[in-house]
Amino acid sequence: MGSGARVRLGLSGGRDSVVLLAILAELSVENNFVLECVHVHHGISPKADQWAEFCATLCATRGLRIDIVRVKLGDLSGKGIEATARAARYAVLFREGADFVLTAHHLQDQAETVLLQLLRGSGAKGLAAMPRSQADNYGGILRPLLDEAPAELLAFAESAGLQWIEDESNEDTRFRRNFIRHEVLPRVEARFPGATRAIARSAAHLSETQGLLEELATIDLAAIGKAGGLDVGCLSGLNGARAKNVLRTYFSQNSLEMPQTAHLEELLRQIKSARPDGALRVKLGNMNAQIHKGILRLVTSTNQPASSFEVRWAGEAVLPLPHIGGALSFSPGIGAGVSVEKLALKPVTVRLRIGGERMRMASHRPLRTLKNLLREAGMPYWTRGRLPLLYCGDELAFVPGIGVASDYRAGVGEPGMVLEWAESFVSR
């Protein structure tokens, strides 16, 4: 953290974050970096307002800036109160503007995280728990107290005459982390002295293991990664563990929901017997796996809209079509796209295929079935039922991937409307 860096501390008001605040306040003067604090007001405890006031007063006495940010946990429901509150805190801490984000996680926090991940059946990535430093989209996160035991932090706080607040919920063993903290680790430490530090050391070893797995996956992805997906032949040639490692890394790099191990294994089983354009019947989190021309592609699961689907275009530059997974954009052009004059003659609507559609692509050529045009264009079979078909009245004027019907094409020098279909549901 060099001179002029902007450092953001997550300040709960508890002992650990107050200790880190005291250390950083002194270092900021010595090293000339800007220290700011953020307190996330969850509103869970009846004392939440008092905690926020305590943090504000603490920062004011040190001449530091603090933001008190209120969050509604209902906006991040479905993960349990612990995970929801944690997600809310990180969402606030990682707002743009800071070069580094610091949290006061310590040695026991790390050991608790390892045990929780172990009980979830996590692999190396989960068991590596919390890294000391980690890059994110806005800067980096640092956990400088990760090697420090709670007793050491308590001794520092008392010797420095620090004051802090106690969160009564930290004693409630109905929460999983508190159960590990108060019921499990003390008994393990009593039988195996130094166990907490040993567990944290194992996390560091597993972090190195995970780094090697990611390096291997990067090498494999360079060989089997294709535009929009993965080469099925190359993927099926890898052994099971290596193939799963590639898939997990691919999901992570593309910010996709991580599937369960059993689903990855089923995907690999089906791939080995699939045809180059075969359908796969496996769900991976919120994604479906599809094969097209020997390339594995991942498509977000959405409900198929009714064949009677119809949306009227009223001149918008972008027509959102969330029910079919994308948006249709309209850009003015000259001598390109759909004739503006002809678009004005009849109502313009977007519909889906129902079968039997025909288009004339050249004035001197006969009508062609849309089914054959899509097949010749190499359109993936799973996207054909969701393509937005643009109609002028009851005449098909434009199909993404196929083009503009000859009777509706803008002539030389004629104003036209260039259409582009942007899918939001196909993985990168």
Image: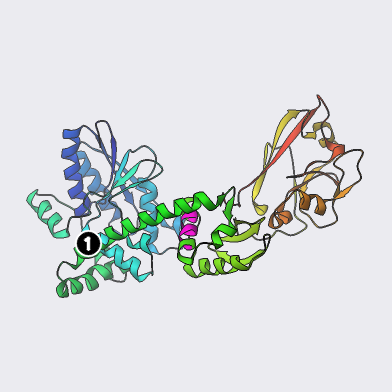
| Residue 323 drawn above or below residue 414 | below
Q: Residue at x 45, y 54 (%)?
A: 217
How is this picture coloured?
Answer: rainbow
Image location of residue 328, percent across then percent down: 69, 43
Q: Nearer the viewer, residue 422 or 18?
A: 422
Q: Residue furthest front?
A: 237
| Residue 247 drawn above or below residue 60 | below
The quarter of the displayed image where residue 188 is located:
bottom left
Amino acid type assigned to the residue bearing label 1 in the image: Gln
Image location of residue 19, percent across then percent down: 17, 49
Image quadrant occupied by the N terminus: top left
Magenta region's main secondary structure? helix
- Image side of residue 219 versus residue 36, left or right: right
Q: Is residue 129 visible?
A: no
Image location of residue 229, percent across then percent down: 58, 52
Image location of residue 238, percent across then percent down: 51, 62
Q: How many marks?
A: 1
Q: Which residue is mark 1?
A: 108
Q: Nearer the viewer, residue 190 or 180?
A: 190
Q: Residue at x 30, y 63 (%)?
A: 113
Q: Is residue 79 magenta?
A: no
Q: Is residue 248 visible?
A: yes
Q: Residue furthest top?
A: 413
* Number of residues whose C-alpha sits closer than 10 Å to that of mark 1, classed few (under 14), some (14–19) or many (20 or more): many
Please give the range of residues in magenta. 244-251
The quarter of the displayed image where residue 30 is located:
top left
- Image side of residue 360 versus residue 399, left or right: right
